[in-house]
Amino acid sequence: MRCAVGCGHLQRGADEGLGVADVRGHVEHPVNRGLACRRGIRESVDPEGEWLSQPLVRRGDSLEPTDWNTALGIVASECIEALADDPDRVAVLGSGQQTNEAAYALGKVARGAIGTRHYDANTTLCMASAVTAYYQAFGSDAPPPTYDDVPETTTHLVWGANPAVAHPVLYRWILDSATEAGCELLVVDPVESETAGDADCHVAIEPGTDLALARAVLARVVDRGMVDHAFVEQSTTGFAELVGSLPAATDAAATAGISLETVDRIADALAEPTLLYWGMGVNQSVQGTTTARALIDLCLATGNLRPGSGPFSLTGQANSMGARVCASKGTWPGHRAFGDPGHRKTVATTWDVPLGRLPEDPGPGPVGIVDNVLLGDVDVCWTVATNPVAGMPDAGTVRRAVDDVFLVAQDAFWTETVARADVVLPAATWGETNGTTTNMERTVSRVTPATVPPADIRQDIDIIAEIGNRIEPELFSEPPIDPEGIFDELRELTAGTPADLSGITYDRLERELAVRWPTSDPTSQGGYRYYVADESSWSFPTADGRARFSRGNYSGLAEPPTEAYPLTLTTGRRADTYNTGVRMRETGGDGLPVARLHPEEIVEYIDALDRGRTVIQSRRASITVEVQPDDRAPPGVVWMDIHHPDVNELTLPAVDPESNEPNYKQCAVAVVAPEQTPPLNYAGLSHQGTADVRSRD
């Protein structure tokens, strides 16, 4: 699995040597029915990343080979020493690249064995604002619609997302539906992305003004009498208060740089059954939660909360949804409320740990953890299948933070984080792993190994369990761990919750390949959420059983352009790369990140270019880039890929106060002439003085 679409792949191990020799879509898998994208195949068969081959420990300036017992002993000893002073002196960062079982086990160690608040995952960097919005609006996380609704809708409204690149298989279904008679595709994006290029209407807003536009559209829905009053009165609360708080449509439209005619075009589209998809362009903002709530408000006000319609956040990583259900990150397993005394007691009893050890709150989020490291409040940081040195905003500050702690990096590949670690724990990856994952529409699938990893590579779950048992004896059975046993513990803990997995077993997945939650019995599976088809009514897990409108309005950019920093940097994905580009990384000719600017902007800054290169500077750092003219980027915008490790040197660490998700998508930058010595660039990171990584040849 490579992204949250959750395609089922058939993989064949190499006849000679190691690795995966062949990958194709699984025609019987109920999610993708044999479809597959190029990235999903390439990253499995021919990853360009450098594989780790053995445990490493730092001796002076070098990482040197060691044995597993030594490496695990050092990690456990450092954790035990730190938590003896205060459990919060240990930080743990997980990932959407783990199986459900490994994510659950890591949460059990972080919260149950260690008891730290300083635990989170890189999924917070992508989806926390959508998650928070769902809880606030519906009382539960995850999109109401499923993939079954894609061909049944009339309007596909894609807002701040580029599924043509990020989710190609899902996008094929969207495009197939949108091109049918009477259907259409509308895209809201400041740049003309690949998805926008296919749209019937591209709404090119000013960067970061999504909330202003959403409120303008809702104001016009109200003004023009397009509200579904029957649904609003029957199944929602707070609508009158929202209407009273709305800005004038003309003012909000002007803020977004959009004509009132275009606002009405979106409102008209919402009068038809609409799936409203959104992604990082909405979530990664200091007003990400408020903006996601505003998009949900549009669906509620127009009655777009029934099969064939609804709000549909597009998740990124392969198991981001699984982390939300299993990892004890923002909630306890099954979306159990973190502060609820009954849920806390159930979790402590299941784990057989003292109730008082469980932290009182979920913690400050990844950026907050970095802040607390810099304050001297953390001694040990353990990262699992994540690359915070490249993937977090204001990366220079993150580097300083990890250099101040004892850093443990557990990963399959060499990364910028591994390079700075004190102990490196080499882990198996997709194609070598046994367990389950959960895609963006709540479907759980089995993943099984196509090949056996080298002898010195261990499963994530075995590494986690070994460390956990050294901290809290008998927390797990003795490794190697049976993932089915861990899944059974997890599914029993979710029984009766909004994210009920209790009806899913390995035997059932063997027969059916994939099952969608919630399901509490061996034959049923989840469908459209909150809608009771037999009664044509709705029921929400809120105090009054109703969905809730919100009242937030646009308050400006976190870092607006100034005379010194007159341009806005925004970021996006590339078709053949994911996350921090560890497996595949597209760069310019010399490994530089690529900055795409409108040709008019290049003319404006021609004196700052030197043989196609320039320097992009923010208040935090300067990086050398290769410049590419691209008229899909509007004037005033620098458009760069998220995958290159240099890019987050520039980005802003300000976070949404409700979700703790960072404001990646807009920051103020300048174009300046290169100097004799180019600024920081991490492409081609040196391994000199470090043990060799493993070869799959």
Image (spheres, grey):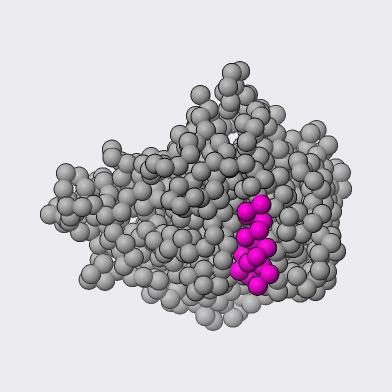
Left or right: 294, with 500 as reference point: left
Chief SS of the magenta region: helix
Q: Judge whether 241 appears above or below 532 on screen.
A: below
Front residue (pair 50, 301): 50
- Furthest toward the top, the residue is 15
- Furthest toward the front, the residue is 60
Q: Which quadrant is the N terminus positioned in?
A: top right
- Which percent across, then down, holds residue 107? 70, 58
- Furthest toward the left, the residue is 607
Q: Residue at x 25, y 47 (%)?
A: 627
Q: Residue at x 66, y 29 (%)?
A: 452
Front residue (pair 616, 205): 616
On whether residue 77 falls in the magenta region, the answer is yes
Q: Residue at x 37, y 54 (%)?
A: 647
Q: Judge whether 358 appears above or below 57 on screen.
A: below
Left or right: 694, with 348 as reference point: left
- Which percent across, then down, holds residue 254? 35, 70
* Residue 341 at least partly seen: yes
On the image, which quarter does residue 620 sit in? bottom left
On whether residue 528 falls in the magenta region, the answer is no
Left or right: 432, with 532 as reference point: left
- Which percent across, then down, holds residue 76? 67, 56
Q: Judge whether 328 appears above or below 169 on screen.
A: below
Q: Which residues are magenta?
A: 73-90
Front residue (pair 448, 72): 72
Counting the numbered discs, the total is 0
- Which percent across, then down, holds residue 184? 49, 47
